[in-house]
Image (cartoon, grey):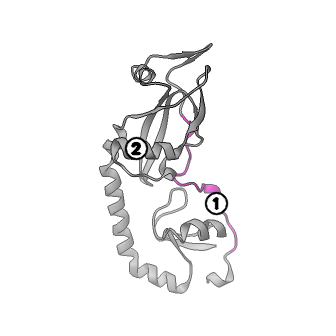
Amino acid sequence: MKVILTEKITKLGNIGDTVEVKTGYARNYLLPNGKAMRFTRENVALFEAKKAELTARQEAAKKSAESNVDAVKNAKLYMIRQAGDTGQLYGSVSTRDIARMLKEVANVAVESAQVMLGAPIKTVGVFDTQIALHPDVIVPVKIYVAQSQDEIEALVAGKSLTFGNKKVEEVEEAPVAEVATEETAAEVVAEPATTDAE
């Protein structure tokens, strides 16, 4: 389906770009969330009339995101979870958990889709990931996951934890999602435009 973007979307395009996307992606995400409009003659004219307003709104959203950068960078994201003898969590730490924690400790509201965590965290340790406050404002954060406050303090101090034969210290980066939304660049395809869209 051919659409006109009404806001910048990572890996897809900028405001005003006309792009081809899968029909489901457009109908289920872009159109209902006001991120795009169908490509028709009427909508092209409507977009041109609203372009200045949409650009101003995008700039305001970027400035708002930039004002939260320090709060997010300095947030202490400490997750206390139960784990087994090997440091494997009973459950996991998901993007929803991280978004909720950011709201609690930094008073910054983000959607779970803005947490660029490729896969849930399933072990105790220290993880680096990113928060996309805006497509142009991506902030790196550290997430500390342990079984108790004492273990959190040890990880913050740079000490290692031992589980059986396994030593846990500064763990490798958590898998980071490439796109700030749940949809990925794979959603963008080159399919012929439908006749009703022109």
In depth, the one of 68 and 43 nearer the eye is 68
Residue 116: tell me if it is visible. Answer: no
What's the residue at 58%, 23% (across, down)? 87
Height in image: 183 above or below 2? Answer: above
Select label 1 or label 2 by which is in front: 2
User: Which corner quadrant of the image does residue 155 belong to?
Assistant: top left
What's the residue at 36%, 38% (across, down)? 75
Q: Is residue 33 left or right of residue 103?
A: right
Q: Earlier in the sequence, mark 1 or mark 2?
A: 2
Which mark, by number, is residue 102?
A: 2
Tell me the quarter of the image containing the C terminus: bottom right
User: Dot 2 lies on which element?
Assistant: helix
Residue 194 in the image: state x and y as whole percent: 68, 79
Q: Are marks 1 and 2 in contact (CB under 8 Å)?
A: no
What residue is disc 1 on? 187
How many numbered marks are there?
2
Gap in angstroms between the C-alphas marked 1 and 2: 29 Å
Identify residue type, mark 1: Glu
User: Dot 1 lies on which element?
Assistant: helix
Residue 173 in the image: state x and y as whole percent: 53, 32
Which span is picked out in magenta? Answer: 174-192
Identify residue type, mark 2: Leu
Tell me the quarter of the image containing the N terminus: bottom right
Residue 57 in the image: state x and y as whole percent: 35, 67
What's the residue at 31%, 56% (across, down)? 63
User: Which corner quadrant of the image does residue 141 belong to?
Assistant: top left
Height in image: 35 above or below 11? Answer: below
Residue 27 in the image: state x and y as whole percent: 60, 71
User: Which corner quadrant of the image does residue 153 belong to?
Assistant: top left
What's the residue at 50%, 68% (across, down)? 33
